């Protein structure tokens, strides 16, 4: 089918809900979509939208038609594929269930989601969002769905009532106009896009973690030039790293929308430990050259040809309508396939180079701990602050020289040189408690502090301060063994030297986010699942 005869999406209105529709052969496919996702959830409630998606579909069981749902950072959608009558039936069920979620299924669906999350393969670079945004907004994606530990049926229904409304919805239909299709939702306003508020970092910078391979995380304005540049970067980098130098199996790039105006771009490559610096340097070399000279004519033609091939498939309109629905809910102009074709045809080497250069200026380069930096000029990712908060200092019980300070404004853990990790009380995003007095706090900026009573002098004073000042509605009961369980008793004579979490008694401060090597830190392990 030529692009001239490709079905064109139409936009119409159904009871105040925008609907995109295009005639596509085959079974009817449709979706009901809402402007709410993981980036809208406070960390202590993370997972609530995912739980609502599960609860909404739980009453359907097995059906003669296919259905599913998903939650991403800014959207929640319910999808169906079947006959016209089955699509109508599905929409009726979803709208009804959202207004009266099955309370008796909350505990069951929590368990199902945890099982789903445990079975998902996790990318080595999932934490690139929290590095930039902390434990807030788009950064919450990198944390476990902590709300599943405590969310009550009432709290879940309240979230659904506020966000799953006609004013916060859109739909699309790949098939004929469906007479009698109903979207019966309560009235409500449109949820504004999440605010893209990055941490105050010196960029570009270098971050070391427990990953294998290397990655470059970037943010920039959404543009066809950047989309094309990342695709060309992937092809050039694969040629160099795999086929020319043989130091990597592959290179992947991806561009994901944030708020409809900004995007997150990621380029990553695998490599053996002894070659990871070489691989990271080669990846950056390719990106730097492309950002200076831009693509050649053959590469621009490849991008145009690939788009034309995609547009020749009549099913491409399904993805196009999905993008139009996403844009509608975010309040931005949709990027249709026809518009993208025009923009691709107008691309120049300088435009692509400029878009990639702007993205690279925001880079966080991620490599394994202990690997040599691929670029000497990269600033180190900040791990501690210059000074602790004011308050009462409590020395480490093992004589390491560290102190845990509690004061009227917050809590600090600092080393012998007074370099500190600080969390203001009002900036606590979530806390976890154990019956033995152990506490873990995560600040909105991603800073984590683990308090283990046996590791500090005056533990009762510290515990009282934490429990009195941590917002009660953001503290959850931990569901994993206490990280203090294997902590030895403090010696009578203090030992010198820094001591770390695990069998030694204190904590690890790294990149504003604790890399705890203890079982208790599993509470906050990255485990997003959709």
Image (spheres, helix red, strand yellow):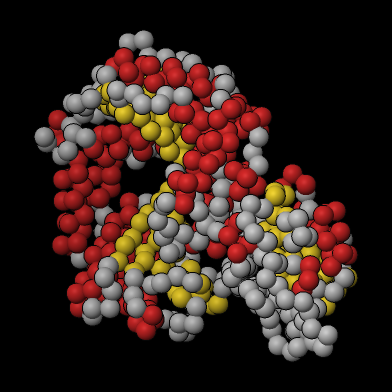
Give whichever of 229, 421 is nearer the camera.
421
Q: How many marks?
A: 0
The quarter in which the N terminus is drawn is top left
In this view of the protein, can residue 264 be seen by the observer? yes
Q: Is residue 317 left or right of residue 40?
A: left
Q: Is residue 53 left or right of residue 46?
A: left
Q: Residue at x 55, y 40 (%)?
A: 110
Give whichever of 350, 372 is nearer the camera.
372
Q: Position of residue 130 (x, y in %)?
A: 55, 59
Task: Tell me: residue 164, above or below residue 502.
Answer: above
Q: Is residue 179 left or right of residue 208?
A: left
Q: Residue at x 63, y 52 (%)?
A: 479
Quarter assignment of residue 11: top left
Give whichever of 426, 60 is nearer the camera.
60
In this view of the protein, can residue 17 be seen by the observer? no
Q: Is residue 136 left or right of residue 385?
A: left
Q: Residue at x 49, y 62 (%)?
A: 128
Task: Tell me: residue 503, above or below residue 43.
Answer: below
Give whichever of 421, 524 is nearer the camera.
524
Q: Position of residue 370 (x, y in %)?
A: 49, 82
Task: Tell me: residue 411, above or below residue 42.
Answer: below
């Amino acid at each position: 089918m030529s692009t001239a005869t490709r079905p064109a999406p139409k936009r119409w209105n159904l009871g105040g809900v925008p609907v995109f529709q295009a005639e596509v052969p085959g079974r009817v496919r449709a979706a009901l979509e809402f402007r709410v996702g993981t980036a809208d959830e406070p960390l202590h409630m993370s997972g609530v939208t995912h739980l609502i998606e599960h609860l909404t579909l739980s009453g359907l069981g097995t059906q003669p038609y296919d259905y599913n749902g998903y939650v991403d950072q800014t959207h929640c959608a319910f999808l169906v594929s079947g006959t016209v009558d089955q699509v109508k039936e599905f929409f009726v069920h979803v709208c009804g269930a959202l207004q009266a979620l099955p309370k008796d299924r909350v505990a069951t669906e929590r368990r199902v989601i945890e099982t789903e999350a445990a079975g998902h393969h996790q990318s080595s670079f999932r934490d690139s969002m929290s590095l930039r945004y902390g434990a807030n907004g788009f950064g919450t994606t990198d944390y476990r769905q902590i709300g599943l530990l405590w969310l009550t049926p009432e709290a879940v229904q309240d979230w659904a009532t506020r966000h799953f409304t006609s004013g916060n919805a859109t739909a699309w239909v790949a098939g004929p106009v469906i007479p009698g299709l109903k979207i019966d939702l309560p009235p409500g306003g449109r949820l504004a896009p999440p605010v893209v508020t990055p941490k105050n970092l010196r960029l570009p910078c270098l971050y070391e973690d427990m990953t294998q391979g290397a990655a470059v995380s970037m943010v920039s304005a959404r543009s066809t030039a950047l989309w094309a540049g990342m695709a060309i970067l992937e092809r050039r980098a694969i040629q160099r790293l795999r086929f020319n130098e043989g130091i990597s199996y592959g290179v992947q790039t991806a561009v994901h929308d944030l708020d409809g105006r900004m995007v997150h771009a990621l380029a990553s490559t695998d490599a053996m430990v002894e070659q990871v610096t070489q691989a990271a340097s080669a990846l950056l070399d390719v990106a730097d050259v492309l950002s200076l000279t831009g693509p050649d004519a053959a590469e621009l033609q490849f991008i145009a040809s690939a788009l034309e091939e995609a547009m020749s498939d009549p099913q491409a309109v399904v993805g196009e309508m999905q993008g139009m629905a996403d844009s509608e809910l975010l309040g931005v102009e949709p990027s249709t396939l026809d518009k993208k074709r025009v923009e691709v045809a107008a691309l120049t080497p300088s435009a692509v180079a400029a878009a990639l250069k702007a993205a690279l200026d925001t880079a966080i380069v991620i490599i394994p701990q202990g690997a040599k930096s691929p670029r000497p000029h990269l600033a180190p990712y900040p791990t501690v602050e210059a000074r602790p908060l004011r308050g009462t200092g409590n020395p480490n019980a093992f004589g390491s020289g560290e102190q845990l300070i509690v004061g009227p404004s917050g809590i600090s853990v600092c080393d012998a040189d007074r370099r500190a990790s600080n969390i203001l009380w009002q900036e606590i995003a979530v806390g976890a408690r154990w019956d033995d007095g152990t506490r873990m706090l995560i600040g909105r900026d991603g800073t984590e502090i683990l308090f283990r009573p046996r590791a500090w002098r005056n533990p009762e004073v510290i515990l009282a301060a934490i429990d009195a000042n941590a917002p009660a509605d953001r503290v959850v009961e931990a569901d994993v063994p206490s990280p203090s369980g294997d902590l030895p008793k403090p010696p009578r004579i203090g030992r010198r030297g820094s001591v770390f979490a695990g069998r030694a008694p204190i904590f690890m401060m790294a990149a504003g986010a604790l890399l705890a090597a203890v079982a208790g830190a599993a509470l906050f392990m990255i485990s997003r699942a959709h």
